[in-house]
Amino acid sequence: MFLILIVLGTILLGIATPTEAATLGIAGSLIVAALNRRLKVSVLKESVYRTGRILGMIALIAFGATCFIGVFMALGGGRVVGDLMMGLGFGPWGMLVVMMIIVFLLGMVVDWLAIIMIAVPLFSPIIADLGFDPIWFAVLIVVNLQMSLLTPPFGIAIFYLKGVVPPEVSMANLIRSVVPFVGLITIGLALVAVFPQLALWLPGVMI
C-alpha cells in the first residue's frame, strides 16, 4: 500500500511526473526492503543486473520498432492501412472490434512494447477519423494488452509462474489455468467499450 500510494498517489495529486514517481517508487522499495531486513548488497546487485537486462531488451525493441514505424509511415504504409480499414465496411464499432482482435492476436506472438510502438501509431489516426475518444481507445489497448501476458506462446506471465510453481505443475496446467482470467479480461474490455465513462471519469476529474 505504501508503494502504491507513493507512486500513483503522487501522480494523481500532480506532485510528480510518471518518471519522478518511478524514482520515488525505487526509494520506497528500498525503504520497504530495509524495514523487512532484506536490504543487502547482493539483493541490490541482482536488482541492478535484472534492471539492466530488461532496459536493454526494451531499448532494442523500442529502437527497432521506431525504425520500422518511421520507414513504414514515410513510405505511406499508414495511409494504406487506414484506407484498408476504412474500406472494410464494418462501421466504426466493427472497425474497433477488428483493431482489438488484431491487438489480441499480436499479443500472442509479439512483445507488448512492440505492439504499442507499431500498432498504436497505425490505429490512432483511424480512431480520430472515426470520432472515438483517444484516451478511451488507449485504455482499451492497455486492457487488451493484459491478455498478451497470459496468452501462449508468448505469455510472459506463464513463464514467470513456471519458474515458481512446484515441478509437478506442467506448462499445460498453467496454460489451462489462465483461460478463466483471459475471459474476465475480455469481459472487462467489453464493459469499458460499452461504458466509456469507466475509462474517462478519472482522467476527466484529473484534467
Image: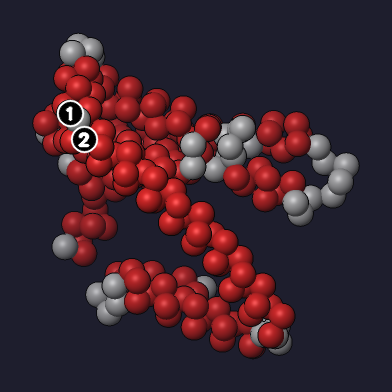
Q: Which residue is mark 1?
A: 76
Query: Is residue 17 at least partly visible in the picture?
Result: yes
When the figure is inspected, residue 127 is found, relative to residue 87, above or below; the finding is below
Q: Secondary structure at mark 2?
A: helix
Please identify the quadrant where the C terminus is shown: bottom left
In terms of image quadrants, where is residue 116? top left
Q: Nearer the viewer, residue 105 or 205?
A: 105
- Identify residue type, mark 1: Gly
- Assess disc 2: are there few (<14), some (14-19) or many (≥20) residues with their C-alpha within 10 Å of its C-alpha: some
When the figure is inspected, residue 164 is found, relative to residue 141, above or below; the finding is below
In terms of image quadrants, where is residue 174? top right
Residues at marks 1 and 2 touching, judged by CB atoms closer than 8 Å = yes
Q: Position of residue 72 (x, y in %)?
A: 26, 33
* Drawn side of residue 45 relative to residue 125, left or right: right
Q: Position of residue 108 (x, y in %)?
A: 53, 32
Q: Position of residue 52 (x, y in %)?
A: 55, 66
Q: Nearer the viewer, residue 83 or 169?
A: 83
Query: Is residue 197 at least partly visible in the picture?
Result: no
Residue in the image at 20% along x and 22% along y: 80
- Identify residue type, mark 2: Met
When the figure is inspected, residue 80 is found, relative to residue 4, above or below; the finding is above
Q: Position of residue 76 (x, y in %)?
A: 17, 28
In terms of image quadrants, where is residue 54? bottom right
- The colour scheme is secondary structure
Q: Nearer the viewer, residue 205 or 17?
A: 17
Q: Secondary structure at mark 1?
A: loop
- Assess disc 1: are there few (<14), some (14-19) or many (≥20) residues with their C-alpha within 10 Å of its C-alpha: few
* Drawn side of residue 154 relative to residue 144, left or right: right
Q: Which residue is mark 2?
A: 73
Residue in the image at 61% along x and 65% along y: 50
Residue in the image at 20% along x and 43% along y: 134
Give the distance between the C-alpha atoms of the residues marked 1 and 2, in whole angstroms: 5 Å
